Image (spheres, helix red, strand yellow):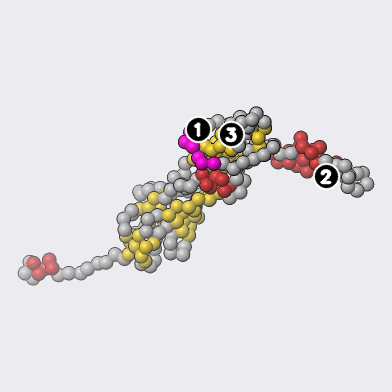
Amino acid sequence: MYSSSPGAPATGGYYGGGVFDEQAARTAQLMYIVCVGIRSTTSGGAPTADFDPADCATHTAPTTTATGADGRPVVVTVSASDVATLLADGSGITRQPPGAEVLISKDFIVYTNPDTQVLSTTVAGTEVIIHATPASYTWDWGDETTTTTTVPGAPWPNQTVTHRYTHTAQEVATTLTTTWKATFTPAGGTTTPVTGTITTTNTTTPYDVVRTLTYLTDQAETQQGH
């Protein structure tokens, strides 16, 4: 029995898999704890010296297994850091306006891609499909303020995530931290949630925050001879 970390991602498509029953997993884990508690002590409460926890193996929470290249069972494990590595490009970030300047008097609009990403990798010679879905977004506006949302934003005129700057500045950038939830499914195995926190970051191109300058002139009056 062994496990391995994913390698480089391959081209992904949609793949089916088993369905992870969270309630069943919790029940099985509880049964395992109860089994260990009962069988590890005698009726008088003293520890049983010859007790083997493997005796309760049938009560452990469901594990994700597959058949390795050598035909033996393989325990497949995918960690949060593994998924984050495969999600190197994150969810992306787009800003409006896209130019070199952002006006203090106007809403600064940002949005990202909320789609589930389907990733493919190999663990111990077994193909594993990972489904990663954005769960929340933290927008760092580059002016010591942040906003956390569960919506990905949208382009104008249907914008949902905006910001207004209060001070001029140069070379400002907005950074998006996306938090993901994910599952992994080995070929012939069961779909299992990835535990731990999965995050990726994206940063916009830099821009200057500027004020609108209004000039008063009597040029038109002068041209008319007034």
- Give the CA distance from mark 2 to mark 1: 43 Å
Q: Quadrant of the C terminus?
A: bottom left
Q: Quadrant of the N terminus?
A: top right
Label 2 belongs to which residue? 37
Residue 108's x, y, as percent? 37, 57
Residue 107's x, y, as percent? 37, 57
Label 3 belongs to which residue? 126
Label 1 belongs to which residue? 14
Q: Is residue 84 above or below residue 103?
A: above
The residue that appears at 53% across and 31% down in the rendered structure is 15
The residue lying toward the viewer, choosing from 123 and 93, is 123
- Do the residues bearing badges 3 and 1 touch, measured as CB atoms within 8 Å? no
Nearest-to-viewer mark from 3 and 1? 3
Residue 10 magenta: yes
Q: Is residue 16 above or below residue 206?
A: above
Residue farthest toward the right in the current orientation of the protein: 44
Nearest-to-viewer mark from 2 and 3? 3
The residue that appears at 43% across and 54% down in the rendered structure is 203
Q: Is residue 63 above or below residue 168?
A: above
Residue 98 numbered tag: none
Which of the two labelled residues, at mark 3 and mark 1, occupies the earlier sequence position?
1
The residue stretch that appears in magenta: 7-13
**Residue 19 in sight here:** no
Q: Is 12 displayed left or right of 24 in the figure?
A: left
The residue that appears at 52% across and 47% down in the rendered structure is 85
- Give the CA distance from mark 3 to mark 1: 17 Å
Residue 52's x, y, as percent? 83, 41
